Structure formats: C-alpha cells, structure tokens
Amino acid sequence: MLEVEINRKSYPDRGGQVHIALSGLSFRARRGELVCIVGPSGCGKSTLLNVVGGLDHDVDGGVTMGGVVPEHSIGFMFQEPRLMPWLTVLDNVMLVAGHTADDRRRARELLTAMELGDVLHAYPGSLSGGMQRRVALARAFVIDPVLLLMDEPFVSLDAPTANRLRNMLITLWQRCNTTVLFVTHDLREALSLGDRVCFLSGAPGQLVLDLPVKLPRPRSADDPAVLALQSELLQEHPELLAGLASGKDTGENDNA
C-alpha cells in the first residue's frame, strides 16, 4: 500500500515570496493499482511525483509504501524520453537495468515487446518521437518497479501513437503488478487508463475528488462508455474540471 500524506509543500518563487504548491493532500494506492492524477496547470501534479519518488525531500509530510519509505524499485517516465544520445537503444535501457546477463536478456525482451528489436543498436537521434517513448517505457519497466511514476509521458504524440503506447503500458502493468501514478491533463486518457482518478484543485493542490473508474477493461479513450463518463463528469463538476483537456488530438504527429 502506497500512503501519501503531504501537509504542506512550499518553495520560494522568483520574487522571493513563498509559493505553496501542495496543502493537506492525502491518498492511498493499493499494490498493482493504476491511479491517474489530473488537475489544472500549476496545481502541483509534477511536484507531487517528485515528492513521492524521493526527488524532493523538503516537504512537511511523508510517503511510505508497505509501512516504509520507498527507496528502491521506483521507475520514472517523464514528458520527454530523456534518453542519452551517445548510448544505443539497448544501452539506454541497460543504464538502469544492472550488469548481469539476465539483466541484458530482460532488456532485450522488453525492447522486443516494444517492437524495437530491430533498432537495439541504433542511437536515439535516428528514432521517431514515438519510438523514443517506447524505449523510455521499456527502461521504466526493466527494473520490475514496485512503483512507477509517469508525468504526462504521452503528451505531444499523435492520437494513434499515444493509443499504441497506452496499450503497451497496460500490458506491462498487468504483467508486472506495478503500482502506477500517472499524471495527465487529458481527462479521457485518465478515464481510459485508471482504476481511479484523483482530481486536484488549483494551487495549492488538494485532493478534491477521488473517483473509482468501474468501466471494464480493455478500454480506450474513444470507447462510448469513456465518452459518456467524461460527459457526466463535465456536467456534474464544471468548475472542478475547467481547463482540462477533452482528449482531442493535439499531437505533433510523431510516428510510432
């Protein structure tokens, strides 16, 4: 069980004033649960992931997993792939995987599952944006993470490529039983992926709605049930959801 209790997270802004990013935010996630975090820009979604992932310790509160502070087996996937341009596809994944023959075998298997078996020795600069995201997804799962933190990992991709990556994510997540926190500004993406969707208020970010998504899997962002639930939420909570993306294709047409 992941338990997050943040009483207050603040930092000085450029003018020297104290900016409160998160306040009174508390939630839990079961092992193997996929929880989507949505909210308006600037509400502290990325800050929340940094705190949960141990990248930011300057916070009044704490994060535990199974009763202890999580320190190992945490995977990350960010808005940008963050691949090392001087390393091959395989070596980028091996960077976090370890150094044994079994580690290398697992890295190859994951990349093959990502349909990247033919470019193991290529460099990131020769890959499309969608292919780079697939490398990043393989890298996130190669350590078999107990907890995976994803910060808008499919933003800027065209709809077909994003859907392909979402399907790959779900396949790996179900196989590994990983707890996932998935930040997105796209409500349809959240409803199609999540077991639950946690809605944050504007800054300072607070949890204002914790919604179980009871729609059967598999599901996609274009499923009628997802569209119906989105419409229902927009009608019931217009102020809460103001400014969230509707899920229309705004991608940059990166190839898969």
Image (cartoon, rainbow, N blue to C red):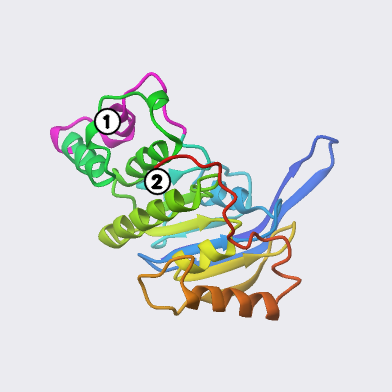
Residue neighbourhood size for the residue with mark 1, other residues' Cα within 10 Å, grouped as few (<14), some (14–19), many (≥20): some
Quarter residue 127 falls in? top left
Quarter residue 156 falls in? top right
Kind of residue at disc 2: Gly
Q: Position of residue 53 (x, y in %)?
A: 49, 47
Q: Looking at the image, can residue 4 be seen?
A: no
Left or right, 116 with respect to 45, comes to: left
Q: Which residue is mark 1?
A: 119
* Position of 118 relative to 176 (above/below): above
Q: Nearer the viewer, residue 34 or 72?
A: 34
Residue lying at 30% horizontally and 24% vertically, measured from the top left: 122
Q: Looking at the image, can residue 108 be seen?
A: yes
Element at badge 1? helix
Q: Position of residue 195 (x, y in %)?
A: 44, 71
Left or right, 172 with respect to 182, comes to: left
Gap in Å between the C-alphas at discs 1 and 2? Answer: 23 Å
Q: Which mark is residue 75?
A: 2
Q: Position of residue 140 (x, y in %)?
A: 37, 44
* Position of 42 relative to 219 (above/below): above
Residue lying at 45% horizontally and 36% vertically, measured from the top left: 129
Magenta region: which residues?
82-102
- Give yes or no for residue 100 being in the magenta stretch: yes
- Give yes or no for residue 55 being in the magenta stretch: no
Left or right, 157 with respect to 207, comes to: left
